Amino acid sequence: MAEQKKVRFVIERQDGPDSAPYTQEFDVDYRPGLNVVAALMEIQKNPVTVDGKKVAPVVWECNCLEKVCGACMMVINGKARQACCSLIDNLEQPIRLQPARTFPVIRDLLIDRSVMFESLKRIQGWVEVDGSWDVKDAPIQNPYTAETAYEISHCMTCGCCMEACPNVGPQSDFIGPSPTVQAYLFNLHPLGKFDAPKRLNALMEKGGITSCGNSQNCVQACPKNIKLTTYLAQLNRDVNKQALKNIFNH
Amino acid sequence: MFHTTFYVRRLHSLVGLLALGMVLFEHIFTNSMALGGAPALNGALAMMELIPKPIFLGLEIGAIAAPLLFHAIYGIYICLQAKNNPGRYGYVRNWQFALQRWTAWFLVVFLVWHIFYLRIFTKGIAGTPISYELLQSYFVANPVYALLYILGMFAAIFHFCNGITTFCMTWGIAKGPRIQNVISLMSMGLCAVLCLVTLAFMGSYFVM
């Protein structure tokens, strides 16, 4: 029988939020269709490094395994992407896995992305439906913008754009491409548009859309192919108009 | 609710394109007179001297020094917010993003040297008028300085031309990828032309 083909993984690990990172190498049996999440599961079953040392299993996060939830985002061979849809056959070996250090690392490849949730709260990433008014039938979406809204609604807050963006990280207060563009989604909504000035004013604050440096990495990194740079430019237009209103309406 | 960050950022963008763009074009225009030899450049410099002194000084402070200081100081703050990563994400625009910041750092150092030596020391304190002969002897005696001036001009030209592209994005003028690409190509074309003009007038000191 032919010798079992192996896939070498070089994994950047970290025992806790404040501990120093180190790397460990693992070999995983190759099989057709193997992806990074499945390989990490194999390592979890048998966490033995290439030197034969038994170590604590590698910690990471995953959920849906079909590029919908965004949980398994990590840096694979230097680029941020979803581990579940990263097929071994398409990757250069050895495969290097790192946590997305734009976010605080909890352990190994597990990161804390709660900052994105905080940013969504900041830009009011929701539609007000409860109030003192009658709730009638849902209003219809504008058919001309529905396609755009559908596209932006695919965002799964995975954080690929945040990791790729040179202006997002511990050195900066930029909320990042994804939460910024979500403001446009809710501004397009037939009910959400009532709060558009609120969202635009929030984007004009420190760390808002003005922190975008136009590196355009976000649009390249987005696994859902959301045209982030186009919507960022649209929002730039919108905040400029909002600024004129703020100045000349009072 | 007064969005200081927003207005300061937009001002930084406007000042860079309009005020400092004018300064850059004035420099390229006047210096390219060197291609016509000493009479042409000295004539252009004499034309500028015709502007009454108080107005000239007012322009130097109001239209050059103040915008430059604001753009540089706030620009340093912007530079410090970036972790340049073209090594990992080697897309053209990301390289331009990093180059925009690297040229900025170089220009801060270069302009301090340029302004202190030529404007404040040579013209201001020593009282030597700037002339074709002065520049030629300076560059020919110190080819390394000539090289640094060429690099300084290249950095400023790239920073300005890439600034046109990002200006169009930041102000929401160019929204879609096609128009953004067209503007980027056009500004890089302008960058190449202005760099060639710079090479020509700087080179003319050595051949004439």
Image (tube, rainbow, N blue to C red):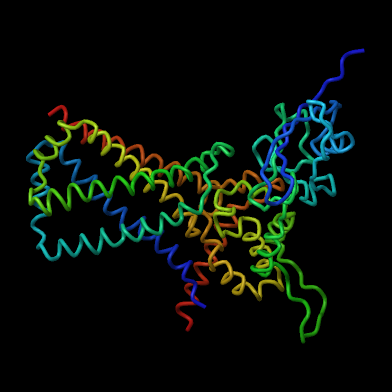
Q: Quadrant of the C terminus of chain B?
A: top left
Total marks shown come to 0
Please say if B167 is above or below A246.
above
Q: Identify the residue at horizontal 42%, vertical 46% (top origin).
A: B162
Apparent side of residue A215 relative to residue A163 in the rendered image (left or right): left
Q: Identify the residue at horizontal 77%, vertical 28% (top origin).
A: A89
x and y percent of residue B1 in the render? 52, 78
Q: Identify the residue at horizontal 40%, vertical 60% (top origin).
A: B12
- Figure quadrant of residue B58: bottom left
Q: Identify the residue at horizontal 82%, vertical 47% (top origin).
A: A62
Which of the two residues, A68 or B164, is positioned nearer the viewer here? A68
x and y percent of residue A8 in the render? 76, 27
x and y percent of residue B105 in the render? 38, 47
Please say if B195 is above or below A30.
below
Seen as rendered, the residue at the extreme bottom is A132
Please say if A96 is above or below B187.
above
Apparent side of residue A153 relative to residue A56 in the rendered image (left or right): left
Seen as rendered, the residue at the extreme right is A1
Please say if A135 is above or below A60.
below
x and y percent of residue A40 in the render? 82, 37
Which of the two residues, A2 or A15, is positioned nearer the viewer here? A15
Apparent side of residue B197 relative to residue A78 in the rendered image (left or right): left
